Image (spheres, rainbow, N blue to C red):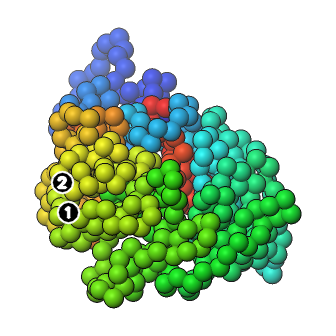
Amino acid sequence: MSNGDHSGTNTPSREQGSGMERHAPTKQPPRESKLFSLPRIVTTLAVIVLIVLVGRWIWPSGSTAPSLQRTARTYDAHAPTSGYSGHATNTHLLSPDWASGIETAWRLPLNAGDKNATVFLYAEGSTLYVTFQSILGSSKAFTAQAYDLSGTEPRLLWDEKKQKPPHIDTSAFVVTDTDIVFNSIIIHKATGRLSHTPWEDMKPVALADGVLVACDEDVTCDGWERGSSGWEQKWTSRTAQHSFTSLNRDRITYLDSRVITNGETTRVLLPINTDQHPAQLIDPLTGVVTNLEDPASYNSEEPRNLLLAHDGIVAYDAFTALTFDAGGFLVGVQPASTGGRMTTDDGTLPSIADIQAFFSGSAPTWATATVKTVNGAKGEQCPFLTVTPTGGGPSRAVCPNDNNLNHTYVAYSSSDIRVSPGADVVFAEFNTLQRHNEDVFVDTRNGSSYVSEELNAAKNITWVFDDLVVGVIDNTIVAFTPHSS
C-alpha cells in the first residue's frame, strides 16, 4: 500500500514509545493530592487519545464499512503510487479485486508546459494510444504516442510529433487493423508514422468492405478506397443533415462500430440528425442511401430511438419497436417495453433477434447483467440500482455505505455500469445534483463502497484491463488499479 492511502490517523511506533512503558517501582515521598492539577489533566487526555488510537488499530470496526485507507477522499498529484501488478487482461468485465479498494497505479505527465492540451486516449490490447495537441506561445504541435501498459509502469513504444499540423478533430475516429484515422491525420499503430488524409474537412464514420466512409458536418458523405498510390475517392452522396452525437444514451446496446452486416449485405449507419429526419444507411461500395422510415410520415417532434445490432437496426418509441435488417428492410413490428432496464457494457453487440427478445421481456443475452435504477429521486433511500446476472443467480442490490461517500445521492442518474462475474462487484458513474461524474465501486455482498477523488477528477476515462482504468487530469495520464493488485 502506498503512503498516500492513509487518512492521517497514525499510531505511535514502538521506537517512539506508547507513553505506557513500565518501570521498576521506586519510593516517592508523600505529596498532596491535586485531583484537577494541570499535569493530571494533560496526562488523562493523552491516555484517552492513546486508548482510542490503539483500539482502532487492534479492534477494527466489525461493520461492513471499508477502511478509509482504501478510499482516497482527497488527492495529491505528487502522492506515492503503487504501480500495476494485475493480470493485464480485458474481458470487458470488472475484476473482483476492485472489492479491495482503489489505488493510483502511476502518473504519466504529457507536456509540463501546457495544462490545456486536448488529449485523446484509445486502448487496444495492452497498448494505450495517446495524442495531444498543445499550443506553447505561438507554436502549435501534435504529438502521438503509444505505451505498453502490461508492466508495473507504462513503457513508451514510439513517440511522433508534427509541428504546425492542420486542424485535428479527435471526437470522431475509425480504427482499422493498421491505423487510427481522424479527419486530417492517420496514425500507423505499429510505428506511429503520421500521414495526411485527403478528406480534411470531413470526419471518418466507418470502414466497411475496404471503403472508408467520411461525412462532413452538413449533408455530404464520400467513400474512399486505399490503392497502391494512396486514397482514391469512389463516390460522393447527398444525405440528410448530420449529427455526430452518440447513440448510447439508452444504455441498452453500446455503439462500437456503425457497420451492419448479415454476411451478404453490408451497410453503414450514417450520423443523421434524427430530430429532423429518419435514420439512414449507406452502401459503402456504391454510396446509395436508404431511409429506415418514410420521411413523409416521420414525426420529428417524437423521433424514435435507435439500437444498433451487428446485423440490423431497431427503432423504437414508448409503444412500438420497428426492426430493420442490414439492407434497411422492415422485418418486424412489436410492442416496445424495456421495463426500465439497462444492460452492462461488455463490448459486444446483439443481433436483431436478441433485441426483439429483450423487448419481449427476456434477459439480454449479449450482456453480463441487467441493471435497473431504483429510488432515483429519493435521496438516501437504498438501493440505488439492482443488478441481475444474465446467466442466473440472485439480483444484487447496489447500496453504497454512506459513511464512505462524500455526499448523498439525490436525483441521480447512472452510466458506464460494469460488473464482475456474478455481479459481486459493481462499478457505476453517478451524476447527482451535487456533482457530475462520481465513480463508485460497490461490493454488493456487504455494501462496502470505494471512491477516489483523483479518479473523479479524471476525464477521458478509458478501460485498459479489467483491473486497470486510465484518465486525464490536466496534462497527466493517471492510472487506477484495485488495492490488492
Q: Which residue is mark 2?
A: 360
Q: Nearer the viewer, residue 313 or 85?
A: 313
Rounded to the nearest angstrom, the CA distance separating label 1 from label 2 is 8 Å
Secondary-structure class at tag 2: loop
Q: Could you tell me residue 292's position as x and y percent?
A: 39, 73
The image quarter in which residue 194 lies: bottom right
Question: Marks 2 and 1: in contact by CB < 8 Å?
Answer: yes
Give me the residue at 13% from left, 64% from top. 378
Q: Nearer the viewer, residue 170 or 451?
A: 170
Q: Is residue 85 above or below residue 320?
A: above
Labels in figure, total:
2
Q: Could you tell me residue 407's position as x and y percent?
A: 27, 60
Give me the residue at 72% from left, 77% from top. 200
Q: Is residue 267 left or right of residue 253?
A: right
Amino acid type assigned to the residue bearing label 2 in the image: Ser
Q: Could you tell me residue 249's position as x and y percent?
A: 36, 66
